[in-house]
Amino acid sequence: MTELISMLPEKREHPKFKIQLHPRNRHRERYDFKTLIDSCAELARYVRLNEYEDESIDFFDPEAVKTLNKAILMHYYGIKAWDIPQNYLCPPIPGRADYIHYMADLLAGMNNGKIPVGGKIICLDIGVGANCVYPIIGNKEYGWSFIGADTDPVAIKSASTIIELNPFLKDNIELRWQQNPKDIFRGIIRNDEHIDLSICNPPFHASPAEAQKGTIRKLSNLKHNNITRPILNFGGQNHELWTEGGEERFVQNMVHQSREFAGSCFWFSSLISKESNLKSVYGKLRTSRAVEVKTIPMGQGNKTTRIVAWTFLTREQQEKWISTRLNRV
């Protein structure tokens, strides 16, 4: 018996906070599964003790991950109903929340340290997806209005259902279908429309094969074992995961196309997952004559990523925008 006990893994000591997350992020502490189950009873079936005797879920199980996300959205963000179609991306909510909080800081930095709140602040989410997570978080945390754009009608329909089932979102999120997949802003930003922020989590991979390898690698890391094929409903649709030229070319195209809407949006931005892509993105920003560029580091678990934000507004134009739209005090 003594020998058996010595073979069991010791219970791990966990830090109180995930210090890599933004200070205002609601998810800096470990998941409180009892509280989450109180908000979403169906989560209980997926919670178990892991090998360290900590409550957890099987992150290898896509239904468990989706239900955890649902519970988080219900408990922290006031969502009453949420679901996504099979095979669509189920995003890690703490990282999505970080992006929103850092963009709020960016606006505050232009506004005497005060974060602008309320529905007159408009954020454009490029690639809103079937999950509608960025608009949900941004509206709950800061009261912002959102435009959610996507090329996929199924994603738009799913996000629309989420909005319909949660009435407080109806007047705060507008969805727009991008009919031309080569366009990012054209066909979405309307004449004389003013947008304070645009955000984007671009497709990372350059081909379906590369995307599949990435999913397999992710699953293998979760299981600490070699996985040879991806699991259904784990990882997202093709258009969510890959695009020709990958993240690098997508963001370069975004920068190029954003120039046409230089006066329509204060801050354009995108996540950049791969540090080696920064050089070419900075080069494109220079040739596109961006007036100001900011790089904001973010930590997500063991992974480091960053936001690149840019504006074409001159200082004088920025001051005018701030005084009329950002509640400057």
Image: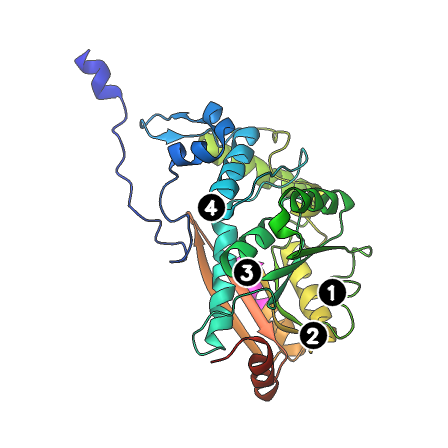
How much space separates mark 1 and mark 4, taking CA atoms? 31 Å
What residue do we see at 52% from left, 66% from top? 117
How much space separates mark 1 and mark 3, taking CA atoms? 23 Å
Mark toward the start of the polypeptide (4 vs 3): 4
**Can see residue 97?**
yes
Q: Is residue 182 left or right of residue 80?
A: right
Instruction: Give the residue pinned by disc 1.
Output: 185
Three-letter residue code for mark 2: Ser
Question: Do callouts 1 and 3 mark residues in contact (Cβ within 8 Å)?
Answer: no
Instruction: Give the residue pinned by disc 2.
Output: 264
- Taking 196 as reference, is 45 above or below it? above
Three-letter residue code for mark 3: Gly
Mark toward the start of the polypeptide (1 vs 3): 3
Mark toward the start of the polypeptide (2 vs 3): 3
How much space separates mark 4 and mark 3, taking CA atoms? 14 Å
Three-letter residue code for mark 4: Tyr
What residue do we see at 56% from left, 31% from top? 62
- Taking 99 as reference, is 221 above or below it? above
Considering the numbered disc 4 on the image, is that residue within a helix, a strand or a loop?
helix
Give the residues in magenta. 271-280
Question: Do callouts 1 and 4 mark residues in contact (Cβ within 8 Å)?
Answer: no
Instruction: Give the residue pinned by disc 4.
Output: 76
How much space separates mark 2 and mark 4, taking CA atoms? 32 Å
The single residue placed furthest to the right in the displayed view is 179
Mark toward the start of the polypeptide (1 vs 2): 1
Instruction: Give the residue pinned by disc 3.
Output: 143
Three-letter residue code for mark 1: Phe
Q: Position of residue 324 (x, y in %)?
A: 60, 80
